[in-house]
Amino acid sequence: MSENSHNTFDVFQWANEVDEIKNNVSVELFLFNKNYTPYKVRYSDKLTNAVKSVFMQEAIGYIIKEADKGLECHEYETSDGEDKVIYRTTLDKVTRAESLLHLIENEYKDIAYFSDNEYEFKKIKGIIAKFSYPMDGEMKYFYIAKSISASSALKGATSWELNGESFEPFSAEVGLKAPDDNQVAIIDKNIIIFNQTKFEALFQYDYKSQVLADEKAKELQKKYNLSFAEGLTLNALLADRKPLLKKVQNLVIEEAMSQKDLIDYADEVQLELMTDDDGSIIIMDEKDLTMFVNLLDEDYFVSPVSGQRFEVKGKKLLAEPEGEPPRG
């Protein structure tokens, strides 16, 4: 796929294309948890048609049917709440969706099969179906994702099944009512949004926070050399933590201390701010990022009286002492 192919993506053409070859489409299911770790899921051959119907045919059927009634596809970032509209954004803007697909596509052999005894269904956030089909001599792929709530699952130990006129013990560990509404499709680096609220909840995507996080991440990385654990980005970490993002927003970054001064300050207050051989500040997780931002905001203090260390919150700048000229 070329870099600009998403700019000309036509979801209506895609729906008609898939509808024509729907009998040749294969599907694989994955569950994913609140940390966006995917799990493979086996399913009975008897469910194949039901899986295709609930995930694929509902989506393409809606697009084709509603297109005749005036359905339009608008850009997600410039639209909100219109009637007869589905939205489109690009995968690279939605970091959790991008990370999830990266794991499915590039770490497939390391993905475990889901077992409730080992991973607990109550921690599952969503289900995603990966569809594949041959077209013009190559394999094409798309995904349909849906959220799952704990209330949609039936636990075998506390559930009964009605068989004819008789209740019997529920025969499975967990029973799932598959979500039958259209929520999110991911096609060729494009995200098609059928349900805005569920999309934002499913991938914890807040566009305004993300734009601000992108802006502040650029400013910070222009001034400081930072090194991140694999799979982490400053943008995503900031967008996820609104109080931290607000603190960064209030900083005048170009006037903040230099990298050397910040590292010296961390040593002074005896904080384990890690650096690599090149002197870059290492950010392994949100705790490291919080420490980095708090250092920038000069939130740590060592008492000259007791030698104890404090994290200062709700700082209030005091007036100059009487009889002394203002500093600066």
Image (cartoon, rainbow, N blue to C red):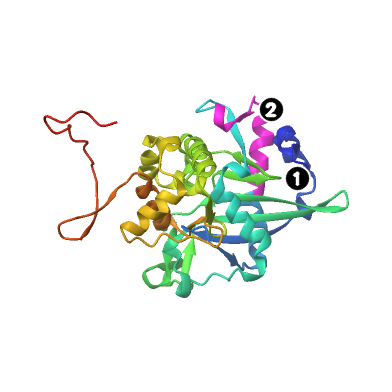
- Amino acid carrying label 2: it is Asp
Q: Considering depth in this image, is 195 or 276 the residue closer to the camera?
A: 276
Q: Give the range drawn in magenta.
A: 56-78
The numbered dot on residue 18 is: 1
- Amino acid carrying label 1: it is Val
The numbered dot on residue 68 is: 2
Measured from the top left, where is residue 28 in percent x and y?
66, 61
Which residue shows up at 56% across the image and 48% down it? Answer: 95
Q: Considering depth in this image, is 286 or 67 the residue closer to the camera?
A: 286
Numbered disc 1: secondary structure = helix
Tell me which secondary structure the magenta stretch mostly adopts: helix
Mark 2 surroundings: few (<14), some (14-19) or many (≥20) residues within 10 A: few
Mark 1 or mark 2, earlier in chain: 1
The numbered dot on residue 277 is: none
Tag nearer the camera, 1 or 2: 1
Figure label count? 2
- Look at the image and say whether residue 76 sits in the magenta stretch: yes
Q: Give yes or no for contact between labels 1 and 2 (Cβ–Cβ under 8 Å).
A: no
Name the quadrant of the C terminus.
top left
Which residue shows up at 64% across the image and 46% down it? Answer: 186
